[in-house]
Image (cartoon, grey):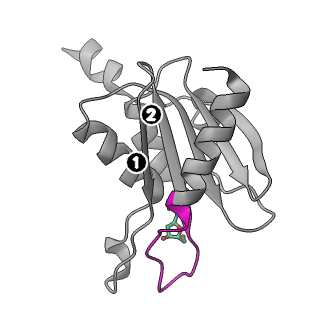
Amino acid sequence: MSDMKQNAELFELAKDAMNKAYVPYSKFPVGAAIVTAGGKIYSGCNVENAAYPEGTCAEAGAIASMVLGGDTQIKDIYVIGKGDELVTPCGGCRQKIREFSSVDTMIHICGAEGVRKSLTMNELLPFSFGPENLEQAS
Ligand code: THU
């Protein structure tokens, strides 16, 4: 798939997911869409809860769907939210993405008009802790 076609398709998928978000408390819907190293596609939305801390982010939903689908390698992840600010993944989601990332992984931050900024995992979470740390310790 060409980069332009992928951007357009994944942007739409993330937007569809955002439009399904369950956000009665924050009223801030977020959508995420993943392309795996093998070219498979997964998406997710944020799902809030009356017990506020139990709410889950869009990235977490997309990652859960990916793992259920048998995949563990994120090539690209698209995240979309409302407003003019960059809706970058929260700290917890940076670590969740990190678990399934490689040096090739790109995080694409989208707004209403399309992709606003594309970042590497290392730009989003420098000096990160990951599975390699545990492997090297044993
Ligand atoms: N949220 C996400 O789903 N992903 C992000 O990257 C940032 C924040 C959600 C959590 C909560 O449901 C709402 O946005 C407001 O914080």
- Checking the image for residue 98, the label placed there is 2
The answer to which of 111 and 50 lies nearer the viewer is 111
Q: Is mark 2 within 8 Å of ligand 1?
A: no
Name the kind of residue labelled 2 in the image.
Arg
Q: Residues within 10 Å of mark 2 (few under 14, many from 20)?
A: many
Characterize the local packing of mark 1: few (<14), some (14-19) or many (20 or more) Cα atoms within 10 angstroms: many
**Element class at badge 2:** helix
Q: Secondary structure at mark 1?
A: helix
- 137 versus 105 height, above or below: above
Q: How far from the left and from the top, in percent, is residue 39?
A: 45, 23
Question: Along the horizontal axis of the image, is 40 left or right of 71?
Answer: right
Compared to 14, does 77 lie above or below? above
Quadrant of image for the C terminus? top left
**Which part of the image, by quadrant, shows the N terminus?**
top right
Q: Does residue 66 show up magenta in the picture? A: no
Q: Is residue 37 left or right of residue 70?
A: right
Q: Which mark is residue 137?
A: none
Residues in magenta?
17-30
Residue 34 location, x and y as percent? 48, 38
At 76% across and 40% down in the image, what residue appears? 117
Q: Position of residue 98 (x, y in %)?
A: 45, 33
Mark 1 vs mark 2, foreground winner is: 1
Specify the amino acid type for callout 1: Ala
Q: Is residue 108 above or below residue 55?
A: above
Q: Along the horizontal axis of the image, is 57 left or right of 12?
A: left
For residue 62, the mark is 1
Tally of marks: 2
